[in-house]
Amino acid sequence: MKMGKLARDVAIIGAGISHFGQFPDKQNPDLWVEAFLDCVKNVDKGIDVKKDVDGGLYFGNFTADLFTGQGHLGPMLADLVGLTPKGATRFEGACASSGLAFRQAVVAVASGVADVVCVGGVEKMTALPTAGVTEALAAAADVVYEARVGATFPGLYANVASAHFNKYGTTSEDLFRVAIKNHENGKLNPKAQMPMTITDIMNQKIEKVKKSGGEVPNWKTDFDFLKSSSNPVIAYPLRLFDCSLITDGAACLFLAAASVAKKFTDTPILVAGTGQGSSSLSLHNRDTFTSFIAAKTAADQAYKMANAKPKDIKVAEVHDCFTIAELVAMEDLGFAQAGKAAEMVKNGETKRDGTIPINTDGGLKSKGHPVGATGAAQVVEIYKQLKGIADKRQVKGNPEVGLAHNLGGSGGTCVVHVFKRK
Amino acid sequence: MKMGKLARDVAIIGAGISHFGQFPDKQNPDLWVEAFLDCVKNVDKGIDVKKDVDGGLYFGNFTADLFTGQGHLGPMLADLVGLTPKGATRFEGACASSGLAFRQAVVAVASGVADVVCVGGVEKMTALPTAGVTEALAAAADVVYEARVGATFPGLYANVASAHFNKYGTTSEDLFRVAIKNHENGKLNPKAQMPMTITDIMNQKIEKVKKSGGEVPNWKTDFDFLKSSSNPVIAYPLRLFDCSLITDGAACLFLAAASVAKKFTDTPILVAGTGQGSSSLSLHNRDTFTSFIAAKTAADQAYKMANAKPKDIKVAEVHDCFTIAELVAMEDLGFAQAGKAAEMVKNGETKRDGTIPINTDGGLKSKGHPVGATGAAQVVEIYKQLKGIADKRQVKGNPEVGLAHNLGGSGGTCVVHVFKRK
């Protein structure tokens, strides 16, 4: 057997997702069961969970430990959906946690230990106040060298943005175009946390000001909103609308050996390539701030295994935890040359009708970012796009090849997958 | 390919371990690097980590999040040992965290994504005071149904012990014999946290009392110590010497495809079987307290894959987080019939010169229990025993088949592996 090639093919046979948002009455178990039931419902020919899912659960969660005080989530969540006493494993790689779970689930089916497995991710974030969330998230950074000296994730990505501005002349307007595009997509996603365009948000604010009798802002285009007090600086140069959301949510998929996938659907989606990379946790150890070696490493592996090139990708989910991260991802994935991603976005190439539609579900910016669920949720969207069941946000032209890019921390972990409709 | 069989064979080619104990001046990175360097040193024909370890790091840690405030350990620890930018994945399944990491590393090599991988586990526990440790550990129980109503791990295992006493007539003396045996073994392990017998501990206490001029206890045998005030009840019927230790420590192994293993050692140890099971987290959901369905499930899978039976096992590491857990493990693994493990221990069958030596390294009781490192540390011992390099604690008769049993929480997760010398 040649290293870097899976011993047998693996396919996705079902995908589901919970509503994303702030749900005071829902905890991790509630969110997870909602996603799981949505997934079961979406298996075309049905699935008998107890009988068919022989490989148990592969599960991503960043830190229910810090968010809710509950560790050891794997068996708890497996038990809720009838998978006990099968194996249940939790994976943690910060915001790439369920990307890691997905990759290891693929590897498990390929290895022969199981024919069918369940993959998921969940994060309940809004039980804490925002300052508590920021502190818990900081556990994904280097606590000694970064968190303890005051760095937060907006701060770390602000450094990335400043470096990109400095090196390539990227601007705040370039970043804002990513947010505008993702909110346009998210408006068409009924599960999204903020399903509205930036223009919708502006109009909402104008209505509110009018009602209160205040001075109505003179916003003519989205860009007038960009530097307004309604879009304050969070960590310069990043403003509020450069940041993804704090979200409760979950996602779920079933994977099967390609040899048995047709039992469950006539149109399984092949996991054509999988890749994973890592990097020092802290930015100060890196050679560059404008590219993530973990992402490049993961992408190289995934493209190679899938025998695909960046130009073959017809729809992609990339990890836009901050708008700058989407630009860097496009460059790391080879969609754009270094420093050229902003131009592609400006030209509309990453819109739903562009050459490489990105974050058609609204991305982390508009759909939301329940950190441990994000990697799995990205794959749910690619599955739907490649099957042609993405409803109003469906990319035209029946895309056959898609990609998901899930980043943890400030690039310490990255997982990339390439998918093909056979 | 037949489900439940690995696509290719996987072997251990090196193993190392840090000192176990309470180290105020060592954090997770220090402990991990100590174990890693010990492992590199122990690869018979040497290993070029950067060149040979193509699959990166599979890593177990329960909750550095709660113990130290640091999540996202995978890439941080990979970076320290030269594995960046290769993939680095953290696994969490409470005290079975590195058992899970080991299993997935085996699966990864079997799948073909890598030829050689590094596996490890670490836990820094003693940065918190004991009450803080107990609270952090409670995150492995069901927080809503157990932790919030006052249950701690000694309390949960006390329930297991009481049920076992009630159903089978097991006694406090039966439990204490497990501790006596494990401390006898641990005395021969230079890396153990408490390398001394119960008799040594008694004598130490007697010396101390003599020096202070107090009344010298009239202890004639270990059993006089059992119900003394020096061995107080922690959670009835469990006493201090029924409980494993609070430990800082790490362990490390290298795995390779069997086809390339001989490059690194003439005596690789084959991973003949791997199994994993789960259960409801909380005891109140179980059919029985005297057996763990997760363990039985994992053992069934591992025995089947290895084409082995309990009587084939000639040396075993089982998860003695409490003395009662060792008895239950022996019964779940089929070494003893239900309710008969205590008799085997009494007859000396689990001593180093018995029919099935158990916890030859001292177990969690004497060697120590850095929770996230324990699963990997158990495999380190079996590797040494099967290779015949376990020094003073080497089991006679060149054992060819060994087993490791790693349990998470109160049985919510279990991983079992069977190993063979080829």
Image (cartoon, coloured by chain):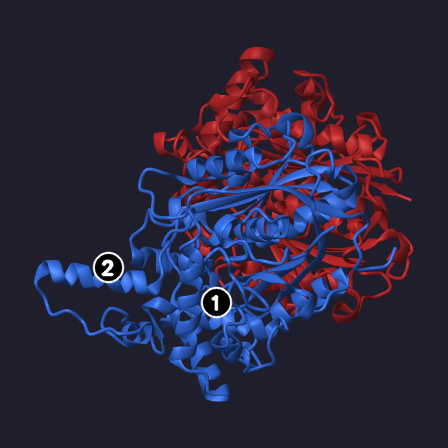
Chain colours: A red, B blue
| Total numbered circles | 2
The residue located at (60%, 12%) in the rendering is A168
| Callouts 1 and 2 on one subunit | yes
Question: Which residue is identified by label 2?
Answer: B204
**Callout 1, which amino acid?**
Asp
Q: Left or right: A70 with respect to A379? A: left
Q: Quadrant of the N terminus of chain A?
A: top right
Chain for mark 2?
A: B
The residue located at (51%, 18%) in the rendering is A162
The residue located at (32%, 68%) in the rendering is B240
Q: Left or right: B128 with respect to A90? A: left
Callout in the foreground (1, 2): 2
Q: Sequence-wise, which precedes: disc 1 or disc 2?
A: 1
Q: Name, please, the residue furthest toward the left.
A: B213
The residue located at (43%, 33%) in the rendering is A152
Q: Can residue B85 be seen in this view?
A: no
Question: Mark on residue B142?
Answer: 1
Q: Where is residue A16 in the image (x, y as percent from the top left)?
A: 72, 56
Q: Is mark 1 on a helix, strand or loop?
A: loop
Q: Where is residue A319 in the image (x, y as percent from the top left)?
A: 63, 36
Q: Left or right: B417 with respect to B358? A: right
From the viewer's perspective, is residue B65 above or below residue B323? above
